[in-house]
Image (cartoon, rainbow, N blue to C red):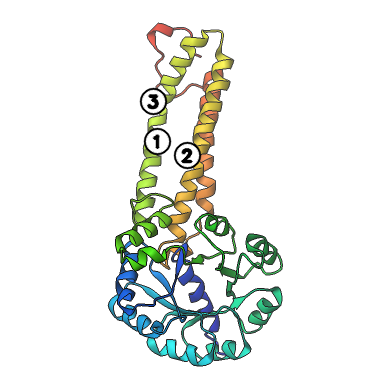
Amino acid sequence: MPSNKQQINNTANQILMCTPVMPVMVINDLADAVPLAKALVAGGIKVLEITLRSAVAFDAIAEIIEHVPEAIVGAGTVVSVEQLKKVEALGVKFALSPGLTECLLKAAHEMELAYIPGIASASELMLGLQYNYHTFKLFPASAVGGTEMLNALGGPFPEVRFCPTGGVTEENFMQYLALPNVCCVGGSWLLPKKIVEEKNWQAITDIAMRLITGGSLIWIPPVLQILVLWLGLLGALLASRSQEHIAIDVISRFVGPKGKKVCGISGSLFAAIVCSFVAYYSIEFIQQSIEYDDIAFAQVPAWPLQIIIPFTFSLMAVRFFLHTLGYIRINNYQPNPALKGENP
């Protein structure tokens, strides 16, 4: 077997990590190929699977590769060695099959494109592993068990990564993406038939943006998301010092000088709830920004952020709690003159 097969497998995984959702494109009108691809790329989705289910599929692939160079173009529904050779000659970066055969597995070993065979059982997966493939398409995902199937396969095959397609919808795709062995999901719901027939390319862009940004229609490049997020967290941390002072005065005004414990407990609980909420969504945004950006950012681990952010906010909550109980004094804190003598 070629020594570069592991590198090609890594490339397959990296390509799929470039996007949370890969559109499964069935192009029946060649005139739609380029504007449809451009609409998806404009919405932040650049990994495209053009299926070989139509008479113009090969021509559509060639057109998109030529006129939409920023797209990462792959061929789907590759079911024969002849098709695999033809799409490689067209210049696709990757190819997917709904199943696997030994002929396809062997032929792909002699090619430079990233090949992603389809599996629907552990036996098929084991056959793929024998040929040193570690990234697979799970198809039809919902029919063979969906997330439960992927969870079950994750036990004996922790090194394997999947792109589930078939029965994946806008309502359930996030359940798949939450699994550690899922690179991305494939689906045709991004391209509603009526919208494509009407050639409403802006609507396609809006759908892509909504999926990439988790519901927002304002798309921000992932690197900029990380920068803005960290600036916001820094501002929140600095502002919290003055807000602690205000919180102590306000709560103390209501509970009186003898209510220090009530003040401390209620204040710390409130701070803990707010900080946990901010930390949870901060981690989620950072993980999505890192994992769904380009290939280089896909290799950045998110676990340090999962530890640092909650730990930072937890310290803030504990600090506020100890201050209000009188065990420590917050630096530079000046009590409200009206409450003089009541502050610990």
Amino acid, disc 2: Val
Do we see residue 191 in this rendering?
A: no
Residue 308 in percent (x, y) is at 51, 45
| Nearer the observer, 266 or 81 | 81
Eye-nearest disc, 3 or 1: 1
Residue 126 in percent (x, y) is at 68, 78
Residue positioned 51% across, 83% down in the render: 78
Query: Which label belongs to residue 278?
Result: 2
- Say which residue label 1 marks: 236
Residue 15 in percent (x, y) is at 46, 71
Sequence-first tag of 3 and 2: 3
**Looking at the picture, does residue 21 appear above or below residue 279?**
below
Sequence-first tag of 2 and 1: 1
Q: Residues within 10 Å of mark 3 (few under 14, many from 20)?
A: few
Is residue 282 toward the left or the right of residue 223 in the image?
A: right
Residue positioned 66% across, 83% down in the render: 130
- Say which residue label 3 marks: 242
Mark 3–mark 1 Cα distance, whole angstroms, equals: 10 Å
Tell which residue pokes out farthest to the left in this image.
67
Secondary element at image label 3: helix
Secondary element at image label 2: helix
Amino acid, disc 1: Ala
Amino acid, disc 3: Ser
Is residue 173 toward the left or the right of residue 293 in the image?
A: right
Residue 143 in percent (x, y) is at 64, 67
Q: Are marks 2 and 1 in contact (CB under 8 Å)?
A: yes
| Nearer the observer, 167 or 308 | 167
Mark 2–mark 1 Cα distance, whole angstroms, equals: 10 Å
